[in-house]
Image (tube, rainbow, N blue to C red):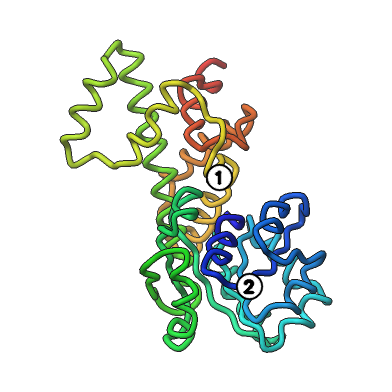
Amino acid sequence: MGKPLAQRLLSAPLPVVVYNRTQSKLEALRDAGAMVADSPENAIASSDCIILMLSDAAAIEQVLLSENAKQQLKNRTVIQMGTISPSQSQELQKQVVAAGGDYLEAPVLGSIPEAEAGKLIVMVGATEEQFQKWSNLLQNFGSYPRLIGPVGTAAAVKLALNQLISSLTTAFALSLGFVQNQGVEVESFMEILRQSALYAPTFDKKLQRMLDRNYANPNFPTKHLLKDTNLFLDAAISVNLNASSLSGVREILEIAQQMGLSNEDYSSLFEAIISNPVASE
């Protein structure tokens, strides 16, 4: 997701410095006019605002919070756009502020096509003052950034939405596998579903992948949905919510990962349902 976000800024046009732990991924951005930094601290030192789109909190800590990098954070603003837990985001805020910087979160809903088109849904955890200062920048990624509340609240909404991705997709895959097993025409099932209050557009987005059993070229891979599901489970349990229904969803995602589908589109969880290794034991 970092690449299309940087491309949006370059087309604004805005000066952009980019860093990736895998430097070969930056060639297209270099060709588009971005300055490529060879280290996180050099990227931070060259920028007033640091936008993070990293896979998890551990990656953020490695890139942003080394001793050398932290020394460069004074008077810089960090905008964290990846999916992490509310408590992880709040801890990042503490460390950035302690280093003399400013911090807000702006996780997004949508994947690479929406990022390329500037049509992401941008959720912001910040003060009103921070939101007003940075909303014009965030509008490059989505037309209507929404201030949710203080740091942690936008991260919570993002996890709540991704929990629906995993739960809805797993529920749909189970129903699809069942009607196929029973000899029902899939289109008959879908026609009824589309007319009902049960329908969600994501079902049609993932239907053909499941029917073709083709999960290549993912916008959102299985491993990332499993990571987000684990984050939601931990956060929900910590506030005494009964999240037992999601434990089964996590098991399906874990099975898909064990089947070698970690880097495939998350609709590959269909394979874990129709090829159930537990049932065959």
Residue at the (45%, 72%) spot, across then down: 124
Residue at the (50%, 69%) spot, across then down: 106
Residue at the (69%, 69%) spot, across then down: 17
Q: Which residue occupies the foreground of this view, 88 or 25? A: 25
Residue 62 visible (yes or no): no
- Location of mark 1 (residue): 226
Q: Which residue occupies the foreground of this view, 67 or 31? A: 31
Residue 209, image x and y in percent?
Answer: 44, 28
Compared with residue 279, is residue 54 higher up or lower down, i.e. above or below?
Answer: below
Residue 133, image x and y in percent?
Answer: 48, 85
Q: Residues within 10 Å of mark 1 (few under 14, many from 20)?
A: many
Q: Quadrant of the N terminus?
A: bottom right
From the viewer's perspective, tell me whether residue 97 is left or right of residue 176. Answer: right
Q: Secondary structure at mark 1?
A: helix
Q: Quadrant of the C terminus?
A: top right
From the viewer's perspective, tell me whether residue 81 is left or right of residue 163. Answer: right
- Location of mark 2 (residue): 15
* Amino acid type assigned to the residue bearing label 1 in the image: Leu
Q: Secondary structure at mark 2?
A: loop
